[in-house]
Amino acid sequence: MKDNKRVHARKYLIADIKIKKSGSRAAGRAVAVNISKEGVGLYTSRPLMPKDKVVIKMTVLMNGALTASEEVQGTVRWIKSIGKNFCAGIKFDEQITGKEHPVIARCISYASGRK
């Protein structure tokens, strides 16, 4: 039986992420492993809980240079403990557009095979 509830297919992407709970100043580090137009899958050492509101900012290699994306708010949809670390699914709280989030939109487009 298939238990994948995703509406949009995730595509592989590796990116450095700064993540913090909404309203917090302390940011932690994470690594993105996949992305879709609705969210991102990541590994982190931060203990998060489903429904936590977070702010993420990705740094990716783009045109030969490290490029930081815009901050985007999201909601933790699920989290799984893996040893001392965690795997989590973050759903973007807003639609990602090229106008508002050009770097993240390009990451989604790249991961989807569209350039």
Image (cartoon, rainbow, N blue to C red):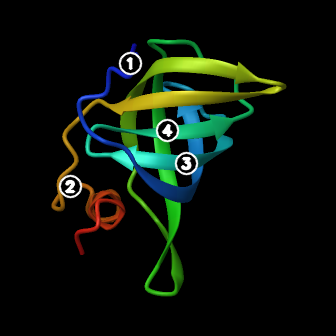
Can residue 27 be seen by looking at this rendering? no
For residue 100, the mark is: 2
Mark nearest the camera among 1 and 3 is 1
Tags 1 and 3 touching, CB below 8 Å: no
Between the residue at mark 3 and the residue at mark 4, the CA separation in whole angstroms equals: 6 Å
Cα separation between marks 1 and 3: 24 Å
Instruction: Categorize mark 2 by other alpha carbons within 10 Å: few (<14), some (14-19), many (20+).
Output: few
Looking at marks 4 and 1 on the same chain, the residue that comes earlier in the sequence is marked by 1
What whole-number distance in Å separates the C-alpha atoms at marks 2 and 3? Answer: 20 Å
Q: Amino acid at mark 1?
A: Lys
Q: Name the residue at 47% across, 47% down.
A: 34
- Amino acid beneath label 3: Ala
The residue tagged 3 is: 32
Residue closest to the eye, 111 or 95? 111
Image point (51%, 67%), residue name:
60
Q: Position of residue 72 (x, y in %)?
A: 37, 42
Q: Earlier in the sequence, mark 1 or mark 3?
A: 1
Above or below, 87 against 59 in this view is: above
Position of residue 111 measured from the top left corner of the image (x, y, whole percent): 36, 61
Q: Estimate how packed mark 4 is, as few (under 14), some (14 to 19) or many (20 or more) residues with alpha carbons within 10 Å.
A: many
**Eye-nearest disc, 2 or 3:** 3
- Horizontal relation, residue 111 to residue 105: left or right: right
Image height of 58 relative to 93, above or below:
below
| Secondary element at image label 3 | strand
Closer to the eye: label 4 or 2: 4
Disc 4: which residue: 41
Marked residue nearer the N-terminal end (4 or 2) = 4
Contact (Cβ within 8 Å) of mark 3 with mark 4? yes
What kind of element bears circle 1?
loop
Q: Which residue is mark 1?
A: 2
**What amino acid type is highlighted by mark number 4?**
Gly
Q: Amino acid at mark 2?
A: Glu
